[in-house]
Image (cartoon, rainbow, N blue to C red):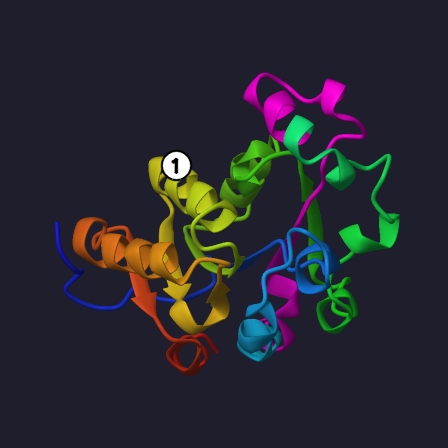
């Protein structure tokens, strides 16, 4: 399917969707993403310049494993200490440098990997004329992947600043970027944060 013939336009219909940049993944927890802090400056720059056009998601686990649905119950059975009854509530907060941008940036809590697992997000974006999403955050191969694939199915154009994405697994991070470039070139543009900032004014 290849690459698009030119970069996607970044106009009034563009929003920045930042996935799960929370203390839960930034600090020393079982789910820490060590190089989150490496990509944080690029995300801070995009969000700081475009706070009103930014939506931050937060991954919010169930209170107990028993509250989860289907295979999620098995998942949280393996991670009982990561449910809300055991987690320190502040760990669900955004990292401080991004939390200070809310408002005017918006905050969206989600119960699963994809941002679109939060009912009504796609419709709300459509009402505002949004057709392009700049997606940053983590993890590239879990929540970002789920969000990107859902957004593709919903018809959104996706721009991925690759230096603003992070994962705990370098191999699958790299594989996903290769996949987007080679198989989803008409729907996904893999670029850099500096080029995004240059084009999105």
Q: Is residue 66 magenta?
A: yes
- Residue on which disc 1 sits: 154
**Residue 27 placement, left or right of 44:** right
Badge 1 local density, few (<14 within 10 Å), some, or many (20+)? few
Query: Is residue 193 placed above or below 66 in the rendered structure?
Result: below
In this view, the residue in front, 104 or 142, is 142
User: Which residue: 47% across, 64% down?
Assistant: 165
Which residue is painted at 18% across and 60% down in the image?
4
* 80 to 140, vertically: above or below: above
Q: Is residue 63 above or below residue 1?
A: above
Q: Secondary structure at mark 1?
A: loop
The x and y percentages for residue 159 are 38, 61
Q: Return the x and y of residue 98 as percentages of the image width and height.
A: 71, 68
Region of the chain picked out in magenta, as a range: 47-76
Q: Is residue 46 visible?
A: no
User: Which residue is located at x 47 percent, y 63 percent?
Assistant: 12
Label tally: 1
Residue 55 sits inside the magenta stretch = yes
Q: Is residue 121 above or below residue 38?
A: above
164 sits left or right of 27 in the view: left
């Amino acid at each position: 399917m290849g690459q698009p013939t030119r970069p996607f336009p970044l106009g009034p219909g563009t929003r920045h969707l930042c996935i799960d940049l929370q203390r839960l993944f930034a600090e020393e927890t079982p789910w820490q993403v060590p190089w989150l802090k490496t990509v944080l400056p690029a995300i801070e720059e995009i969000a700081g310049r475009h706070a009103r056009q930014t939506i931050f998601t937060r991954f919010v686990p169930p209170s107990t494993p028993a509250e989860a649905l289907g295979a999620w119950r098995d998942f949280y059975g393996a991670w009982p200490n990561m449910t809300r009854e055991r987690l320190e509530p502040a760990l669900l907060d955004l990292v401080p440098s991004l939390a200070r941008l809310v408002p005017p940036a918006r905050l969206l809590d989600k119960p699963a990997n994809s941002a679109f697992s939060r009912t009504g997000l796609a419709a709300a974006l459509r009402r505002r004329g949004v057709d392009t999403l700049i997606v940053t955050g983590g993890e590239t191969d879990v929540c970002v992947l789920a969000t990107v694939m859902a957004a593709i199915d919903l018809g959104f154009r996706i721009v991925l600043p690759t230096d603003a994405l992070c994962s705990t697994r370098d191999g699958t991070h790299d594989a996903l970027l290769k996949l987007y470039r080679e198989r989803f070139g008409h729907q996904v543009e893999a670029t850099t944060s500096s080029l995004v900032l240059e084009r999105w004014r």
